[in-house]
Amino acid sequence: MEELIAQLKGKIIEALNLVDLTPEDIDADAPLFGEGLGLDSIDALELILLMEKNYGIRLKNPAEGKEVFKSVRVMAEYIAAHRTK
Amino acid sequence: MRTTHKVEITPTSVVLDGRLLPFRESGEALLTEVYRQRVGDWPKFFKMDLLSKVGFLAAELLLEAEGDRHRGGSDRAVILSGRSGSLCDDRDYQQLIADPDDFYPSPSVFVYTLPNIVTGEIAIRNGWHGETMYYALEEYDPAALAAYATLAFTDPQTRSALCGWVECPAHEDFYANMEIIER
Amino acid sequence: MIITSIADHILSPIGQTSEETFRNLRAGDTAMRVHAFPGVPEAVCASLLDEEALRPLYEALSLKERFTTFEKRLILSISSAAARTDIDLASDRVLFILSTTKGNISLLDQAEGFPPERVHLGVSARRIARHFGNERMPIVVSNACISGVCALLTGMRALREGWCDYAVVAGTDVQSRFIITGFQSFKALSQAPCRPFDAARDGLNPGEAAATVILTRAETAPWEWVRGAVRNDANHISGPSRTGEGSFQALEAALQGVDRRELAFVNVHGTATAYNDEMESIALHRAGLDAVPVTGLKGVFGHTMGAAGILECILSMRALEAGVVLPTAGYDTCGVSYPLQISNVERPAKGNAFVKVISGFGGCNAALTVRKR
């Protein structure tokens, strides 16, 4: 799981162009949205795309993202349970 | 109508009010250098397409020259023009949908396939609610640009405008010639 | 001196003139259906023009060179509007103002033998103006979804400033893989005919139309294009303001000096996305328009992008003439914070003016008031 979390942090930084951040700057248990990383609605759609592209997961309803993107750890757990690649 | 400040950005130079600013980099790396040296507090910059980066930085430099930062209000318009519009980002987006076996259209690339997004980025940064407009022109024509800017002043609320030409035909290739004009 | 319109034209999937489109709209016609779009994985519910059906109309134009679909539709609409006037379109007192978001973008996918620079909006616009023998540099407004209203406003301003005696304002967009996959990436498309302001709304439909209005100055005339304004939310490049700030401010500016009781209706943007319609309800409420009837037309025509603002203004003029508030197809149960005077059936109109309001990516919003005298 820790390996997946580390990999995911790198992919999030790349996909969302968080140029000034390193994986160490992202707390795996902190909320992804709201305060902190300053992510917005387009970033949420990009995270959905990231899961589709890298792990073969298709969220049918973008609203599901709210639960999945609570933190990097929650996201990693979701990916581990649902990944098809 | 008078021009208060002017800026010109090319891949190898940044000239603000007639003064060449010292930077080392060139091309898109120059834009990152300008951002780091003169702005620094707006990480959204790194999410922007090339057109928005160039227009945004030109605006930041003009506002730096203006000094007292003009925030909020509805009295300042942003009127930009160009030949290629969002073509540089259009091509990037087209690449993403070209291969049916590697088909992942990205919303953050698509959103910049509208050339007026750069005017919105500038309005957002400054909290400006005034008019924002993008006109496409066949070729660079300073007289036409000046005329287009005056149209924004037919709105009685417009007191000043950030306007001019911003052009990005391809990656590493860009040109901005923008100014602040006042009633 | 006032700004007035002397001719207009709509090319839509339900009509080849403004009158035919209006008649069929009132009869409940729509071309909205599910299409398999080449190269797009999911089916798309859209209102599209039928190129085969348009061929005889294109042929009647006796074009002297090859034009793209985008250009042909604009030439057809402009020719049809101008045919109702005695204007010489080649005159240097005629200014072409075109409205589009993506113009010839499909040439990136398939060049169809056109040179690469044809994808530049200014280059394409010049070809269109030259077809009519007009050598003035056309103005192309590309301001996302609000382009049509911005082009009309630019025409009004150009006339007031004396730049021209006639402004030919025309807009269109051709739906393509490029645009449709982009909207899909935003999860913004509905799989069924869209439902503006409804509790069950779940996105927009792509649409196609071309529309033209010819504006001029007059001392007195049946139509007065009163005032318009563009304002920015200064909030987010794709998400509308939570307070409807830009739309509210545009409405306030466009309605300056206009008694709200004069308004027969507001023609809204009403894309049927969750955020747009909610934002518009807030903006209308803040602008004191709660009691004014509201019409949204996207349930019939979809989002026609560069044509939308022009198409919706023309149909609003026809509605004022007919003394009706057009229904909002797809609306049933209020799904926004501030209930509007909205209905899915036609109602009699009281009042002699309307305001058109529209919003787009980049945080831009526009409003425009038109009065029947």
Image: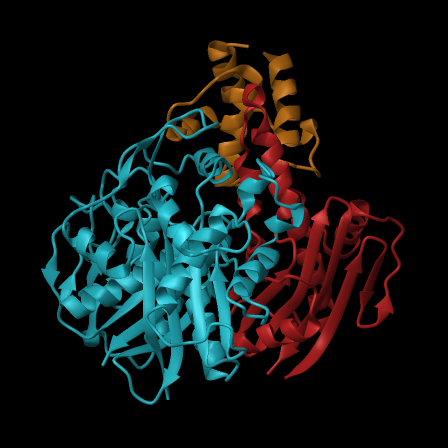
Residue at image point 56% right, 64% down: C130
Q: Which chain is orange?
A: A
Q: Position of residue A29 (x, y in %)?
A: 54, 25
Residue at image point 61% right, 41% down: C113
Q: Position of residue B166 (x, y in %)?
A: 68, 59
Q: Position of residue B143 (x, y in %)?
A: 67, 75
Q: Position of residue B164 (x, y in %)?
A: 66, 67
Residue at image point 65% right, 46% down: C115
* Above/below status of B70 relative to B21: below
* Above/below status of C18 relative to B45: below
Instruction: Check the rendered structure and report the hue given to chain B.
Output: red
Q: Is residue B11 left or right of residue B106?
A: right
Is there any visible trace of residue B99 in the rendered image?
Answer: yes
Residue at image point 41% right, 76% down: C87
Is there any visible trace of residue A36 in the rendered image?
Answer: no
Please tell me in which quadrant of the rendered image residue C30 appears.
top left
The front one of C94 and C331 is C94
* Above/below status of A51 relative to B106: above
Instruction: Check the rendered structure and report the hue given to chain C.
Output: cyan
Please tell me in which quadrant of the rendered image residue C260 appears.
bottom left
Q: Quadrant of the N terminus of chain B?
A: bottom right
